Image (cartoon, grey):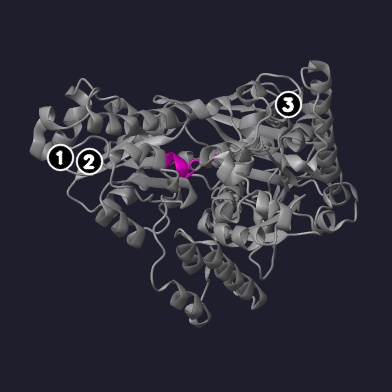
Amino acid sequence: MNEIYSQMQWLPRVPPEFSTRLKALGDLRGPLGPELQGLAMCALDLNQLTKLAKAISKARLDSRPLAPLTSFRLAVLSNSTIDLIVPALVASAARHGVALEVIQPHYDQVAQEAMTPDSTVNRAQPDAVLFALDYRAFPLKLSLGDADASSATVQGVLGYLQALRSGIKANSNAVCIFQTFAPPAETLFGSLDRALPGTLRSLIDGINRELAAFVRTSGDVLLDVAGLAETVGLADWHNPELWNMAKFSFSDELIPLYADHVCRTVAAIRGKSGKVLVLDLDNTVWGGVIGDDGLDGIKVAQGDARGEAHLAVQRLALELRQRGIVLAVASKNSDEVARAPFEKHPEMLLKLDHIAVFQANWNDKATNIQAIAEELSLGLDAMVFLDDNPAERGLVRKLLPQVSVPELPEDPAYYARTLAAGGYFEAVAFASEDLQRAGFYQDNARRVSLQKQVGGVDAYLASLNMTIIFQPFDATGRARIVQLINKSNQYNLTTRRYTDPEVAAAENAPEVFTLQVRLADIFGDNGMISVVICRPVEDGAWDIDTWLMSCRVLGRKVENMVLREILAHARAAGVRKLTGVYLPSDRNKLVVDHYAKLGFTKVHADDSGLTRWELLVEGADPESAPMEVVSQGFSAMENLPA
């Protein structure tokens, strides 16, 4: 079943009217983003990707709006030919909600472009630089059996990659995306190649290990091309004829797959990965129909081929939940019947307490998914819907195009593999708090349920017994701070993105005021839910450079309490006023009135929707909320610089 990957079978097939829809783009009114994304959602071949990329380029030249696609500028530095890859990247990015602009310098000018301050790449100030190198970019001299020489070679390559990174960071400060290296299919000793120091396979394995370890601590991003090549097969990945003829580092037939992996990584950098797996039940989580077959008749047991196929789906769902993905159910069933296997079947891996929202009724699946999103306070683009029924998949795609809906093969043995292959939950970083995220959202669903039972907002908030905790940035919270800054889109005043080193710089700068905010209540710990960065400017003011919050705490007046904390520190530091800016994006319209609601005065607005605001510190008294306040870890407030 290599076709799952090579043909990207998690995507719907290309409709017959693909070319007609492309030609009709010029007649459409308004933003083209939804139609472009819809066209990109299919399993396009290289020719179709190229045509779609041309349509996107023409839309740009004609100044057509591409909303709601998010803009991203990616520079690609490579030792191989990428002319066919660039349009595939542009078109594939639309699939992931990104309007991608690719900066392509001259062939094999990697070091020159990275290290020269006024190079094409550094002048362009990209959001990220992809080092699309393969193992032939390095002089990997064999040192058979010599562990010291092998280690020196590995460290030499790593040092070169670190030098490339330093050049980019010094000159454009873009995010660096490093690829692992796919070894050749050919071996020298056979199986011994992997164990013997100094073989090409051993050297490349060592480089990949060291690169992965470096990226984990540097704040950069890893694209595991070696893993992708091994998945499809090294012999299929490497095409010696194409390398000899045109310096293509891998088979042209696999360009759509490679482009999709690059673009899902770019989307993850922008916080566009899935957060919720919504599960159908009958013939998806178990074999059979619970309402007809009964508890004893459904297939969900070890030793039964069909049952084990569905258990693999459950096992993957549990593993996703362990890393922070929220699980929900959308099933056409009576609630009592649908819950019975979770409560009573001894072979079920999934239990009711693993499910954050359980929607079992006779509504259509789109209506239930909409209800799940509302109960979790998440956007529809955070939802991934798994259903064996093609009619249900088609309905959700039509009514809720923002929801990701993988195609599934006829054989349930490949359901779990197909879901994993789609990369819907791609991650570029990991924080310990991720392990608790599914529980956070599950608790949030219970809060929504409580709100329906308690009369009035004030009574509801008081019933939560909330505790809000304020701390400055620190090394312990840094990974989560960076993650929030780079993933929060809706409740984010500026959507400015900062890397790990940049957050560390703010953390250590005495003139910068920083806040990490946590919230707990009767249902549990919400974890870190807000980040603030204030920088001193002229006239004794603090400018609110960054203010973002997790959408799962909306409606609890957290923003009021955050402002009260900022004001307390500003007064102690002798700050006269606070200033802030709202920079509109395609996804942060939620906070267009944020400053107005908090009592700021608008002092500037332009045609782009950008607004500037200010608040005099003296006399400012934002509304409070019923929660205990803990402020800890700050140096004496009177010593904070204004």
Specify start and end residues of the magenta stretch as a single range: 419-426
- State which tag comes first along the sequence, 1 or 3: 3
Mark 1 burial class by Cα count in 10 Å: few <14, some 14-19, many 20+: some
Q: Any mark on residue 289, and which?
A: 1
Q: Which residue is mark 3?
A: 199
- State which tag comes first along the sequence, 2 or 1: 2
Considering every residue shown, the one lying at the far bottom of the view is 27
The x, y position of residue 319, in whole percent, is 42, 28
- The residue depicted at 23 percent of the width and 54 percent of the height is 364
Closer to the camera in the image, 570 or 400: 400
Element type at mark 3: loop
- State which tag comes first along the sequence, 2 or 3: 3
* Contact check, label 2 and label 1, Cβ < 8 Å: yes
Q: Amino acid at mark 1?
A: Val
Q: Amino acid at mark 2?
A: Asn
- The residue depicted at 46 percent of the width and 40 percent of the height is 552
